[in-house]
Amino acid sequence: MADSLEKLFVTREKDFIKQNILHAKRSYPAEPKQRSVDTRYGDTHDLKRSGLLPIYVHKKNYGKIPRCIVKVRTRVETAEAFNGDETSRILACQYIDKEERKKLLDGMKQRWEEAMERFRKLPFLADTLPKAQKKARLERELQQLEKDIAIIEQHSHIYVYDERINAQN
């Protein structure tokens, strides 16, 4: 009977009690999750997901341009350098010939006639603010058209300067 009891309580070479004690001595306590409490009732939210900690700022690629954008930028720059030779050949000034000048002048006179017709249809007395504003706007438009027509009639040779072409160079 004593042999059967000894078989039940077999002594093992591992001492689990000592191992647990050593493990407890060496281990650190678990850190609680960082939370923020935002109401007086104790509603808590995870601090990492709240955006209050600067996690993204400390990443190694923070503030650097992504590689895909750098590739596209270099492609565009090489294409602009290649096409830059062709755009420099294009003249920045373009001469307006007599037919085109006549067409432009007729179109401006037509616009002046239409604006004058609208102006004549306005009431003589502008008693409300919107009516006065509309009348002032039409007067400004008529004055500008008259100035442009006078400039085109005075000058027989007209050159048009294209700013977009020079902005690229």
Image (spheres, grey):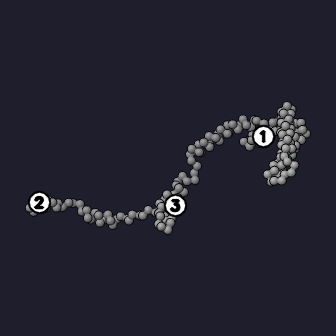
Three-letter code, disc 1: Asp
> Tags 2 and 3 in contact by the CB under 8 Å rule?
no
Give the percent coordinates (x, y) of residue 142: 85, 44
Q: Secondary structure at mark 1?
A: loop
Taking the image as shown, residue 14 lies to the left or right of residue 159, namely left
Residue 77 in the image: state x and y as whole percent: 65, 41
Q: Position of residue 27 (x, y in %)?
A: 35, 64
Taking depth in this image into account, of 52 and 12 the one nearest to the observer is 52
Is residue 158 visible to us here? no
Q: Earlier in the sequence, mark 3 or mark 1?
A: 3
The quadrant holding residue 163 is: top right
Amino acid type for the residue under numbered disc 2: Ser
Q: Considering the numbered disc 2 on the image, is that residue within a helix, a strand or a loop? A: helix
Locate residue 94 relative to residue 33 in the image: left or right: right
Establish if 26 lies above or below 68: below
Whether residue 46 is visible = yes
Residue underneath mark 3: 53
Query: Disc 3 residue type?
Result: Leu
Q: Residue at x 67, y 37 (%)?
A: 82
The alpha-carbon separation of the residues under discs 2 and 3 comes to 64 Å
